[in-house]
Image: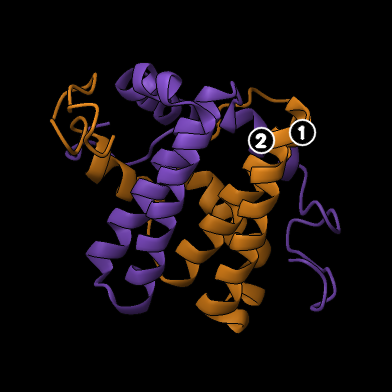
Chain colours: A orange, B purple
Amino acid sequence: MSQQDNPTVSLDDFQQMIRRMYYEKDISRGVDGTFMWLMEEIGELAAALREGTHQEQMEEFADVLAWLTTIANVVDVDLSQAVAAKYGSGCPGCGAFVCTCPDEGKP
Amino acid sequence: MSQQDNPTVSLDDFQQMIRRMYYEKDISRGVDGTFMWLMEEIGELAAALREGTHQEQMEEFADVLAWLTTIANVVDVDLSQAVAAKYGSGCPGCGAFVCTCPDEGKP
């Protein structure tokens, strides 16, 4: 998954990489402490969306994704399985692959 | 990417699926409105982490990931490229594939 290779990353590979990289720290910090880091990254993403460059936005998206993945590791949620189950058969609201939920509805 | 198949999902495929499913709505809502939905999902994830079942936690992780992806689509950030660039060569802090940053440091 190096920068030089094709950048297509499997969600499962990414989750395993983050697990290998941070799991010891994540487990000792626990869900609450890890969630606080996620919130900090969410704030940085908001700032980058407001006034950051495209490069800064990319970095903040990567960080939010990494911290979200870290929490998934702590509670043993398989992200790949989670998104396949919820979105793999279409929009959870209307069931279509191009959402037809009413505009006032959630999606 | 159906529930029946191997649940290994590429981040790129997921982003494209979310784009196909929601892009029209996402673009007309814009970043600010979409970010609000992400925040609502973050709140639901926090609740599920606190007192939800494993199934509920899976669903909330999927939703947070979907809304994060939706915002990435609006600002044209490729998530797969973003994580490969930031984490593909090791921890952004120490450069190692098993993080050796000091515990008081960010990760």
* Residue drawn at 66 percent across, 49 percent down: A63
Q: Position of residue B48 (x, y in %)?
A: 32, 69
Q: CA distance from mark 2 to mark 1?
A: 6 Å
**Residue at the location (45% across, 19% down)?**
B27
Q: Secondary structure at mark 2?
A: helix
Question: Residue B51 at what x, y percent from top left?
Answer: 30, 78
Quick one: quadrant of the N terminus of chain B?
top left
Circle on res. A16: none
Q: Is residue A95 above or below residue A62?
A: above
Q: Which percent across, then down, holds residue A94?
A: 13, 31
Q: Chain of mark 2?
A: A
Looking at the image, residue A72 lies above or below residue B62 = below
Up the image or down, B87 lies above or below A72; here it is above
Q: Which residue sits at x=39%, y=36%?
A: B9
Q: Amino acid at mark 1?
A: Gly
Q: Secondary structure at mark 1?
A: loop
- Say if residue A2 shows up in the picture: no
Asked whether residue A15 appears in the rendered view, the answer is yes
The residue that mark 1 highlights is A52
| Number of numbered tags placed on the structure image | 2
